Image: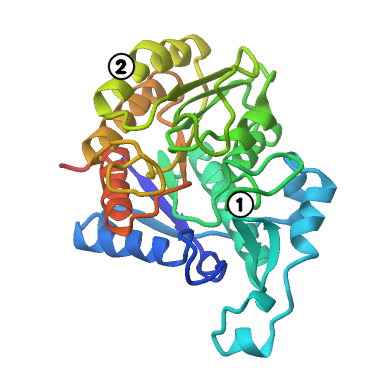
Amino acid sequence: MTTAFYTHTDCQLHEMGTWHPEAPSRLQAIADQLIASQVHSALQHRQAVPAQESVLALVHTAAAIARVRDNCPPLSTSCEQGGTGDADYFMLDPDTKLNPHSWRAALAAAGAALAATDAVLAGEVENAFCSIRPPGHHATPSASMGFCLFNNVALAAQHAMQVHGLKRVAVVDFDVHHGNGTEQAFAGDPRVLMVSFFQHPFYPYSGAEQAATNMLNVPVPAHTQGELVRQIVLQQWLPALHLHQPEMIFISAGFDAHRDDEMGQMGLIEDDYAWITQQIMQVAKTYSHGRIVSCLEGGYNLPALGSSVVAHLKVLADLPD
């Protein structure tokens, strides 16, 4: 397997306050664990090229794009000196802020997902993981929300269809939160199958009622562990994926369903993420020439995040456990 690892230094510049769990340290925790586990050297490391603003229109309205672009605060004296006072932020919602670098970070994150899609479809690599932030799956076509500015996975999937001409793609979302933005972007589009599980009732309090026949979003109660999730994958996800026969698979890879992550109350462990990845890989090998692009979403307990990404990447790269 050739697995590319995409990231960009600008993704580290976006921050929403020292208290905020969606922090630059998330990417550093992943990088540290890749080195400690010796997975780092097995990956093809690539620096993303930031997306052009025009590409965001594949998914987002002009007003949604402008709200992020035009409201990043200026680089103040406090910010230049490392300050994180409220004056250095613009509130998009109670959980989501812009700092002076957020626009650059959002373009870098989207650019990584697009570049990974191009590389996989060109046959340069078989699959790719994007270690990026801000995350994306809560960003709807018309609004940023829930830590997310633009929907990286939705942009990549639309890019694969609009630019590369793919006729069928799948989005697999295993974050503890429902990917409401991705659902809104693709509900009713027969080219796209979305499958997910998520804790419910829980933020963003959506997904329990199926929005369209191409949405297979499975709510699960708090404290759900790996055994039930594996049943959902085997009994619901896989039949739907086999029926859809996707030409490429995109993963919203959230690791906040881990038992050690206090952002949610689910009970997955590293072996569960590895097993889920194996099932996705088998579908990709059958219908998609192995083509997968995985993008980081949630995951806020730093040790659990790092070790879960390592487990995910070991499967993608076909490395020994």
| Residue 172, disc | none
Residue type marked 1 = Ala
| Identity of the residue furthest to the left in this view | 321
27 shown above or below 140: below
Q: Is residue 247 above or below residue 47?
A: above
Above or below, 276 relative to 320 = above
Q: Which circle, 2 or 1, is nearer the viewer?
A: 2
The three-letter code of the residue at mark 2 reads Gln
Identified at 37% across, 66% down, the residue is 28
Mark 2–mark 1 Cα distance, whole angstroms, equals: 32 Å
Residue labelled with disc 1: 110
Judged left or right of residue 319, residue 292 is right
Is residue 164 or residue 191 the one in the foreground? Answer: 191
Could you say where residue 180 lies in the image, as x and y percent from the top left?
61, 34
Q: Is residue 265 left or right of residue 65?
A: left
Q: Which mark is residue 231?
A: 2
Residue 109, image quadrant: bottom right
Q: Secondary structure at mark 2?
A: helix
| Foreground residue among 26 and 96 | 96
**Quarter where residue 111 is shown:** bottom right
- The image shows residue 63 at horizontal and vertical percentages of 84, 49
